[in-house]
Amino acid sequence: MKFFATPNINFARLNRPILLVALSVSLICVGLVIAFGLTYGIDFLGGTSIELRFEKNLEIADVRAALSQVGFGNAEIKTLGTPTEILIRVQDIEPGTEISDAIQAEITKAFPDNPYSVQMVEKVGPKIGAELRTDALWAILVSSLTIMIYIWWRFKSLISGVGALAALAFDVLITLAVFCVFKLEISLSVIAAFLTIVGYSINDKIVVYDRIRENLKILRRETFENLVNISINQTLSRTVLTGGTTLMVLVVLYLFGGEVIHNFSLALLLGIIIGTYSSMFVATPIIVEWHNRRQLNRSRVVAKVPAN
Amino acid sequence: MRRKNLVRTLIILMVIGWSVVVLYPTYNVNQLESKAEVYYAKIQESTTLNRNEIRAALNSGNLQLQARNHFKGVDGADLDSFINANVQPLIELDDKIKEDEPKAIPLGLDLQGGTYLVYEVDLPQLMQNLAKAKDSDFEAAIQAITARVHSTNDDFFDILPAVFQEKGFRLNRYFGGTRDTDTKIIDDLKLEAEDAVNRTLEVLRNRIDQFGVSEPSITKQGSHRIVIELAGIQDVDRAKRIIGTTALLEFQLEAEPEKASAIRNAINRVWKRKIDKMGGQSSDSTFQADTSSTQGKLREDTEVNLRDVFGETAIKEDRPESQDSSAANADSTVLVDQEIFQDRPFDALLADLGGDIAVPTKNRLAVENILNSPEVQSVIPNDSEFLFSNRSHPAGDQEYYMLYILKKEPELVGSMIADARPSIGSELQAGRWIVNMELTAEGARIFSRVTEKNVGKRLAIVLDGRVVSIPNIQEKIPSGRAQITGMANDKEAKDLAIVLRAGALPAPVEVIEERTVGPSLGQDSINKGKFSAYVGMALILAFVFIYYKLSGLVADFALLLNLLITMAVLAAFHATLTLPGVAGLILSVGMAVDANVLIFERIREELRMGKTIRAAIDNGYGRAFTTILDSNLTTLLTAVILYQFGTGPIRGFALTLSIGIIVSMFTAILVTRVVFDQATDRFAIKKLSI
């Protein structure tokens, strides 16, 4: 079985429109992120989150009524999957207060014939939340920078690094926008997923860059634009295959992995799909366009651009 | 070529062998645990115990006893055969599991249940403890520092001098020698803080060790935070109580009775003056005659608006540990003896219970506020203090907290306790739980002297500022043994003993982060993780085979090997497996496919260009190598950053991803190559099935 044995899709012809599309999509995403806002989990806001599993079904309204008795009437309450699993989330205002105990005591009082077990408790003080936010930001920045420097070093070309970085930003931005629009919670594991997307996405770019570098040595007669085109076509089967298998695995994880890593696997899923797209339709067009512009400023025709 | 192949084949076989050996304990434990599940179910069926209780009984070694006590069926032969058929085998299985468990892959908290706690040492409080002379200016400064600590992320030792400077004090007014410079004082304080955090670490480690949790983890984080991980713990609240209590134990004598009454009179005077200044009773005071509960009351009380007691002064902040937070607002009422309210407003809030001052629960907050007010503080002499009892006592139909006037300077402190044991009391304390204490040599000496000089007086045993018991000194006690009575149940006695043995914390600690996962959620996650892993692997293996035919099989073999070796490395390094870790494993396998795809696609290209099979294979591997290296390296870089930045579950993910990728370079490049080489060497292959 073979996909794309000898493809010859002319990607280059569509460079300009593609870049325009990428740019507009990015801007729309920025707008969406600002409009819908990031739904932070308690990891970044601070607060207490309790997951209880009851024996019998429960109405959220009843739970809310019970919580109002202890001043938590505006807590976030939702069911997880089944009507017997309740998630209660409260924002911590004062440090050191034992919210989870108060809530549990009240629930026990309000529903004496419906025993429950505590599945999970998470409590994050507000200061920690702020620290984690800073840490997350740093982690993303540092890894993006490290990657850019690495590519610059390996491929001796700054524009390759910039192109890769732009593609990475594109990946993360779109995934982030989806999370914002659907009000999906951004927790520590989601940030970890973003970092993984960065790492995976760069894989794709490197495979294409590698091909380009190799072709520059052999196909000396081609224009740069054609050369890039050929390189993408040559790596197309590999990109689709690897992307496909990784995707397969992530879909399984998303469907069967359970509530706990739900958002995590979704972020990875989206990121990898978009990452595959951005290798061909963001990173390389940027490089080609850059090269073309530089060519116009020079008299030489030979493709003496990102060479080793 | 053949020799090179031989060596490489041998290396691969050795690695496989090593992996199997290292992973065997994990496999074994898994098998044994599945078998044990059957017995768990059977025991749950025939007794009233639930799974958690069975687990706890197994840990404490008394499952047989518990099973007997909670057996649902008929006693006698049935019971014995049940024990033999189900309880005994489970105990044996559990022992075997415990043997191999240390060598198996440890499960993260999110898979085995447990709790992750981050404690922060209360540095402002520590500073208070270290200060040489405290006055109201100092208190104000400490409050400002505390506020800033909670609202900003600045370093504590930047905040401290900054606040002092703003208030206009010099540091040497409260710390260190009078001629020490600010820098020296800050440096000294930093050392003190570091020492305190280290001591806190030791004390907490002691406490946790006595808890009986298997493999607890306690480490320092940053300069003044402590991370505690308790895997598989059943009672998280109890653990937090034991860890979080400061456990400062002090033995304080009661103040002389004349002095005590003098203080009380002074307080009444001062408070009356204050209320009179505030305009006395406001015109809309509400005097509710409390007629419903005149039965069995200690005196005639009426309910009075707090505003009348305090004037317009707002009631201060709610104390976290008081149950009656509803009494915090100024519109609630306190019980007041109307007759004496005019002349002795303080006494009006109190009652008399067997000669001691009793405070109705409703009034406690008000009394505390009065005692803490600056006017009253100024009339309480420096060598005395008021302390409440640690729990309330019922009398009539009300609950009262006892209030004692004690000498501030303790005669004995907790560090003089050599040992503490919970036990059931005798004689006066027959049937009730107590804690027997044995003092150190020095402590015994001091105790002997104190008891000798103060026969007939009472010695209060104070824990964290609350009076636990206040026994009468009947005679000189030379033995250095003492008892703490008044424990509610066995748990309380045991917990207090643990905490006394481990020692007091130099400064209070506060939970700033907690993540607890219950065991059933953990089991859930394990099941889901396993299922996803199986399905994901199956899909990948099938797909690779279909696409690359026989060569695909070779790649499949390499992928399976990848999984095996990665898990063996985890076991060898005793690295914790978390749920995201399982995701990382699956992901790394998905990415390992990449390496194979790169190589195989190259080989296909070479074949298409007409090269021989050998040449195609050679070129395929050669050309693909740099690409694989580059792309894997960048993913590794991000995984390393993830490891640094993340905690717990995320670290597990970064770890398995990294190990999986590194191993995949081994399996994809070396293993498949060896298979190909062996095949082309031994068989005359005309067409490569790829």
Image: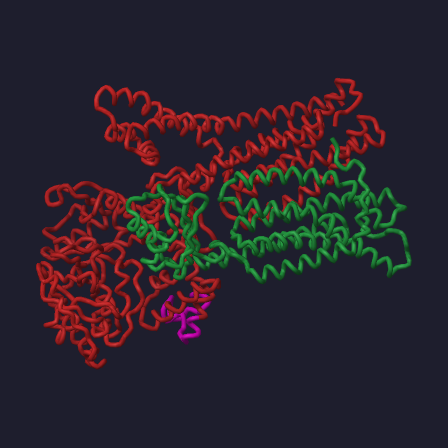
Which stretch did the figure color magenta?
Answer: B163-185
Q: In which quarter of the image is the C terminus of chain B?
A: top right
Whether residue B614 is visible here, answered yes or no, is: yes
The image position of residue B217, as x and y in percent, is 42, 43
Quarter holding residue B255? bottom left
Q: In which quarter of the image is residue B635?
A: top right
User: How many numbered discs sit on the rendered protein?
Assistant: 0
Q: Colour in which chain A is shown? A: green
Between B572 and B284, the one lying in front of the other is: B284
Chain assigned red: B
Residue B149 locus on image (x, y percent): 43, 64
Q: Which residue is drawn at 18% across and 49% down?
A: B486
- Give x and y (percent) for residue A36: 56, 60
> Looking at this view, is A251 or B356 the one in front?
A251
Q: Which colour scheme is used?
A: by chain
Residue B331, above or below B427:
below
Residue B560 located within the stretch drawn in magenta: no
| Residue appearing at x 23%, y 42% in the figure | B490
Please indicate whether residue B268 sits to the left or right of residue B496 in the image: left
Q: What quarter of the picture does the N terminus of chain B occupy?
A: top right
